[in-house]
Image: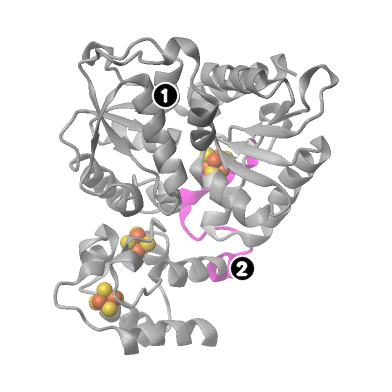
Amino acid sequence: MIPEKLREKIEEIIDGCLECKSKPCMKNCIMLNEFGEDPKSILKECIAKNEIPDKLVYSCNMCNRCTIACPKDYKIQDIFMESRILKIKRNNGKSPMKGHRAIEAHQYLGYSNFFNTVNKAPKGNKTKRIFFPGCSLPSYNSKAVGNILDFLQEKYDGEIGSVLKCCGKPTKSLGQVEAFEKRYAAVQKAIDDTGAEEIIVACQSCYRVFKEHSPNQRVRSLWEILPELGLPEQTKEIGKDSDVVFGIHDSCSTRDNVEIQNGVRRILAQMGYKTEESVNTRGNTRCCGFGGMVMPANPEVAHAVITERGTEYKTDHIVSYCAACRESMENAGKDSVHILDLVFGDRYIKASAEKRSQGSVRQWINRFKSKKELNKRK
Ligand code: SF4
Ligand code: SF4
Ligand code: SF4
C-alpha cells in the first residue's frame, strides 16, 4: 500500500510530466527502461496497483542523472528512497530483497571491533583532525592507507589521528534509517572523543554522509587536500614519460563538487600522467553501477550500467578515486587503478596493467591489515 504523502509526490510527477518526446530521463537511465516506457507510465502502474514493486525500488542507483536531465527536475530517486524506508519499516528492519542479506552481514562485520580502530594523534599531540579511510579503500589497499597517514602526519606536524569504521552508507542506502542512525551515532562519538575538528575522508560517499550528519566537524576530501599540500617528492612528474592515457572516472556521489574533481585532475597533472575525459564527466558523470546497492538486488541492471560506463572511454586504462568505482571499472573490462595506486606506486606504463580485484576473504584480510597500519602510527 502506498501511503498518502508518497502517493501525492508520485501523482505530482504523473500530472506534471511533460512527456518529453526525446525522453531525456529514459536516455540517462538503464534501469527505468527495464521497467517501462517512461516514468509517468511506470508510476501510473504503481498507483493503479497501490504498490511500488521491491525490485523497481531497489534497482535505482540513486545517481541523480534522471533529475539532471529532466526539465522539471523530478527527483525520481527520492520516490524510490522513500519507498525503501517504508519497506524496511514494514519488514522489521530488513530489506525485502534476498540478495541484501550479504550487505546486512557485511555491515554487521564492518562494525565489529576486529575491523575497527580509533587512534588519537601520536606522541600526545593534539588531535586537530582525523583521517577516515572508510571501508572500501582499506579493503583494497592497506599499504596505501598507511602511506597516506604517514604523509598527513608529516604535513600536519603529527596532529592527526585516524578512525577506521564504516560510515554506514550501505545501511542508509537500503533504507534502514534506524539502524543507520544508531551506527552513525557510534561513529560520531568515536570521532568526537578524539577531539578532532576536521575529518579527512578518502571516499566520496563518506564525504556526503559526513557533510550531512556531522555539522560540528569540517569535512574535507583527501583529493582537495593532496594537491594543496603537494604530492610526495618521489611522485612528482613520475608519469611524465608514461605510454598510458588514463580515463578519469568521477564518482557520482560528489558530482556537484568541483573542488574534488579539480583536485583529482591536479594530482594527476602533478604526477605528469596524460588523461582523457569521458563523454559524461564531472557533474555529468555516470554511476559506476555500485550505487544504491543495486548489484545484489538486480545484478542484470548493475552489470548493464557497469558495461555502459566502460564503453564511454577510448582508453583501456581508467583511474578512479573510490575503490568501489575502481572495482566496477575493472568489471567493465578496463585496466583499472585507484589514484593512490599511482601516488604511492612506480611509474605506471601499459605493461603495468593487471587484474587487481580481490575476493571477499582477501578484502577482509586487507581491512584487518589496514587497521594494523593505522595502529602502527598511533
Ligand atoms: S537516480 Fe539514476 S538509477 Fe535512479 S531512476 Fe534516476 S537515473 Fe535511474
Ligand atoms: S524528463 Fe522529466 S518531464 Fe520529461 S518525460 Fe522524463 S520525467 Fe517527464
Ligand atoms: S561510503 Fe562506502 S566505502 Fe565509504 S565508509 Fe561508507 S560504506 Fe565504506
Dot 1, how many residues are within 10 Å of its Cα: few (below 14), some (14-19), or many (20+)? Answer: few
Give the main secondary structure of the magenta stretch.
helix
- In primary-sequence order, the first of circles 1 and 2 is 2
Q: Is residue 102 visible?
A: no
Is residue 194 positioned above or below 5 on the image? above
Say left or right for 107 vs 274.
Answer: right
The residue closer to the viewer here, 216 or 334, is 216
* Membership of 194 in magenta stretch: no
Is residue 335 positioned above or below 170 on the image? above
Q: CA distance from mark 1 to mark 2?
A: 34 Å
* Membership of 89 in magenta stretch: yes
**Badge 2 residue CB within 8 Å of ligand 1:** no
User: How many numbered tags mark residues here?
Assistant: 2
Residue at image position (29%, 75%) is 71
Q: Position of residue 370 (x, y in %)?
A: 60, 21
Name the residue that disc number 1 marks: 358
- For mark 1, give the secondary structure: loop
Residue at image position (45%, 83%) is 9
Name the residue that disc number 2 marks: 89
Residue type of the residue flagged with mark 2: Lys
Say left or right for 18 vs 223.
Answer: left
Q: Position of residue 272 (x, y in %)?
A: 32, 20
Q: Position of residue 221 (x, y in %)?
A: 54, 39
Which label is found at residue 69? none
Residue type of the residue flagged with mark 1: Gln
Q: Which residues are magenta?
A: 86-109
Which quadrant of the figure contains the C terminus? top right
**Badge 1 residue CB within 8 Å of ligand 3:** no
- For mark 2, give the secondary structure: helix
Q: Is residue 83 visible?
A: yes
Residue 115 position by quadrant: top right
Image quadrant of ligand 1 equals bottom left
